[in-house]
Image (spheres, helix red, strand yellow):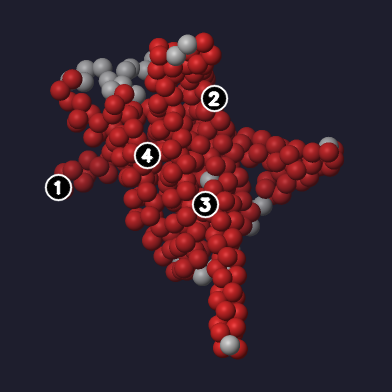
Amino acid sequence: MSGLIALLDDVAGIAKVAAASVDDVAGMSAKAGMKAAGAVIDDAAVTPKYVHGFDATREIPIVWRIAKGSIFNKVVILLPIALILSQFAPWAITPLLMIGGAYLCFEGAEKVWHALNPHPEHDSYEGEEVGDARQLEESKVKGAIKTDFILSAEIMTIALATIPPEQGLVMRAIVLFAVAVAITAAVYGAVGLIVKADDYGVSLARTREGFLRSAGRTIVKAMPGFMKVLTIVGTAAMLWVGGNIVLHGLAELGFGLMYDTIHHWSEFAAHAVPAMQGFVGWVVTAFFDGLFGLALGLALIPLSKNVLAPLWRGGQRMLGREA
């Protein structure tokens, strides 16, 4: 009997450790998801454009194919790379994170620039042959997965940076896997709802009466505005998160003047409004981080256009000649 009691006590102890580990994984995964908010929101805002112009019956299958590509990017490619970096080159995480943050700033600033200086856009579907629908779908899915790879790399790097360094390799792997699955499910589940919302609204308006018909019409009318709001929120989140990542990285590398200044401004504003100190402090920090992100992104636009893009095209031409 004493042996059985000892065994049960050991089992209870193991269960407590397991429960604590689950709590740790959940807590670190949630923290990583919040840190990656900019990339996540932008992913949800960008992806619906890849199903634009296709038959309604193909929308969910296309989203599903992109989601599978996204989870492959995160789990099969990026997760092992992240673990190798954390194990053998942890010093590289901050610079890589700053590069990703700068990319977010560039993407966000480019969207702001195009919004302020609109150019006539040509319909990307004009000139496509009807018989090429399958080929067009393949092209769009591949393009979406490539775009997702960049955002997924940023998400996984941010997630890795939020895991305390004392955590072991197995715990890091579990947290990164949890983040990869949870964020992919959340993003592409939301995308699926978004792309089918107008179809659902049309169905309600056509087949129902009274309140449901009115609700259907409201959904159809609201979706274009909702997409615009989602795009604006995504852009703001990219600038805020990207700016914060770069400033935090600079502080870690010994250039913390701007980061510390924003922190002091945030504390001053928070103390001025005692009833909402946390919220006010966050708003001030996010505003100035976003302002820095916008300035950095705008500075990177001419660099990308006049230096990086020509170098990239020249490299591709050289590789093409060698092949």
For the residues labelled 1 and 4, the Cα–Cα distance comes to 26 Å
Q: CA distance from mark 2 to mark 3?
A: 25 Å
Tell me which numbered mark, 4 or 3, is placed earlier along the sequence.
Answer: 4
Q: Position of residue 302 (x, y in %)?
A: 45, 32
Query: What's the residue type where badge 4 is placed?
Result: Thr
Observer-nearest residue: 83 or 54? 54
**Considering only vertical position in the picture, is 275 above or below 163?**
above
Q: Which mark is residue 323?
A: 1
> Which amino acid type corresponds to the residue marked 1 in the rendered image?
Ala
Q: Residues within 10 Å of mark 4 (few under 14, many from 20)?
A: some
Mark closer to the chain start, 2 or 4: 4
Q: Based on the displayed image, in which of its 4 quarters is residue 48 positioned?
A: top left
User: Given the image, on which type of amino acid does mark 2 rest?
Assistant: Val
Report, in whole angstroms, how far the alpha carbon at label 2 lies from the one at label 4.
Answer: 21 Å
State the residue position of label 2.
229
Q: Secondary structure at mark 1?
A: loop
Label 4, label 3: how many angstroms apart (C-alpha)? 17 Å
Residue sitting at x 45%, y 63%: 173
In the image, 312 versus 236, the foreground residue is 236
Residue receiving disc 3: 158
| Kind of residue at badge 3 | Ile
Q: Is residue 34 above or below residue 43?
A: below
Q: Are marks 4 and 3 in contact (CB under 8 Å)?
A: no
